[in-house]
Amino acid sequence: PKGNPYMSLRDQMGTIFQDEDFLDLYATEGQPGLSPWRLAWVTIMQFRETLSDRQAAEAVRARIDWKYFLGLDLTDPGFDFSVLSEFRDRLLAGSAEERLLDKLLERSQAHGLIKSRGQQRTDSTHVLAAIRVLNRLELVGETLRAALNELAIVAPEWLQNLAPLEWYERYSKRVEDSRLPREQSKRDAYAQTVGEDGFALLDALEDDNTPKDLQELPTIDALRRIWQRHYERRDPEATSEPGSTEPTVRFKDKRELSKAAEGLESPYDVDARYRKKRDTQWSGYMVHVSETCNPSEPHLLTHVHTTSASVHEAKCTTVIEEALVEKELAPDDHVVDAAYVSADLLVKSKRDYGIELRGPTRPDVSWQVHVEGAYRPDDFHIDWEQQWARCPQGKQSISWTDRVDSHDRPFIQVQFSQSDCTPCENRALCTRIKSYQSRVLKLHPEPQHKAFKAAQSWFESEEGQRQYKRRAGVEGTISQGVRAFGMRRSRYRGLDKTHLQNVAIAAAMNMDRLVAWFDGRPRSPTRTSRFAALMPH
Ligand code: SF4
């Protein structure tokens, strides 16, 4: 039928994928029932229409547009839905998931639909892990249950010899808060018992007669890590009086735990992490989406980067730019929000990748910024060559020292003289340190300092403001990914599989954008609410 996106794309760009793109993932004798290039498309098409594996296999069997796009006869019987999860496993085993997006981009480049350089923008959103959110009691109970279930599969006899009868009663059913006692003392006792059971299992696994590979099981690793975070185990001989009944296992108080970002949230997805960002709290991942935004080309997603939720945006800027360079899709300008920008990153992007990182710099948080007339670092004159600074009162610094902060970042400490600062009549506008101390400036090294200042001026300029407005478009892309393609929630467990999902979604979104471009459909503008549209200009 006319206007069908699959048919339009096939007519304009052919099959795009070739079997050779994926053949290395198959042993010569183990070729799949459906050729790899078709499975790659079915994977993308199922995310385009948010279909399950079963529904996607049914679409291949029954839908004429899918058959046309995949080059199948109308009578083709299709394949069993399990082939799709096998194909995903092969992609992951061969680290080939990026090909779903990259081959489409290569083909688009060959058609002149996307060029390197120009402008690209990046933003991120949260992805919820495919796990039940557990409170601490549920977490420890469920972690031990998961370990016992895995051992029951791989070492049933070993486990049967070890497990006392109470364990069957305690860990046979899913641990749910509604089934746990209400009373605090009973809840404490439950946590204590589970802790002791967990340590008993870990001790047994470390016994010389226990097969060593049992210790390597993923659920045992999760048990070890979760116990380390939530329990303290004391050596009875070191801590107690002889004959003492003081427990040797203690469920730690919430306040004693290491940062939430470091803790496992579930034994079933050990990559998912907790994060709170402004008003949003979630357990799972972050996905960073980059796309082109040149006015004369279709806006295509060029890269997706997936991390655990606890990884900060600033840690992703370099990884994303490196990937764009590798794909030969590095932009001239990379437009991002403040979270992706730092003085170091501004220098690194330009020096290593030839990319101007464009975005607001993080604001100065010192008190001087908020007090009228106070002396901010910008009010000091810096002589980089001679390595001194002059304060607004005309006094020259007495020392200039290279230092490194706790994150291994170099900085310069510039110190003024006590004999100048102590009697200074404007001291209250300059520093709040003790009266016998003098003003100290903390500066970025010169390249970072200058890059930071240049980025600040660009952002405050009219041209900078005009260009930065384009960043907002990527929020629309993320909103489209979340609403129409299921980007908000991972279908799978683990970072790798969640990333594969995000790559397939990006390819599916590009598919729609290419079709819209070929059909001459204009891009939808960034949504403005009815009320916001009434704002007087
Ligand atoms: S306190 Fe020291 S550094 Fe600050 S203005 Fe006075 S003399 Fe200059």
Image: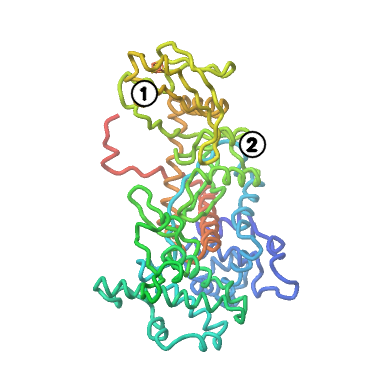
The correct choice, above or below, for 475 with respect to 509 in the image is above
The correct choice, above or below, for 292 with respect to 399 in the image is below
Residue reaching furthest right? 28
Near-viewer residue (506 or 388): 388
Say which quarter of the image contains residue 245: bottom left
The correct choice, above or below, for 396 with respect to 450 in the image is above
The residue to which callout 1 is attached is 431
The amino acid type found where label 1 is placed reads: Thr
The answer to whether the residue bearing label 1 lies less than 8 angstroms from the nearest atom of ligand 1 is yes
Name the front one of labels 1 and 2.
1
The amino acid type found where label 2 is placed reads: Asp
- The residues bearing labels 1 and 2 have C-alpha atoms spaced at a distance of 38 Å
The residue to which callout 2 is attached is 352
Name the residue at 30% across, 76% down: 180
Question: Going by the image, does 497 lie left or right of 258?
Answer: right
* Quadrant observed for ligand 1 in the rendered image: top left
- Crowd around label 2: few <14 · some 14–19 · many ≥20 (10 Å): few
The correct choice, above or below, for 18 with respect to 34 in the image is above
Near-viewer residue (281 or 24): 281
Name the residue at 52% across, 76% down: 203
| SS label for mark 1 | loop
Q: Position of residue 466 (x, y in %)?
A: 44, 30
Say which quarter of the image contains residue 255: bottom left
Label annotation for residue 477: none
- Crowd around label 1: few <14 · some 14–19 · many ≥20 (10 Å): some
The answer to whether the residue bearing label 2 lies less than 8 angstroms from the nearest atom of ligand 1 is no
Q: Position of residue 129 (x, y in %)?
A: 44, 63
Near-viewer residue (314 or 476): 314
Q: Position of residue 380 (x, y in %)?
A: 45, 18
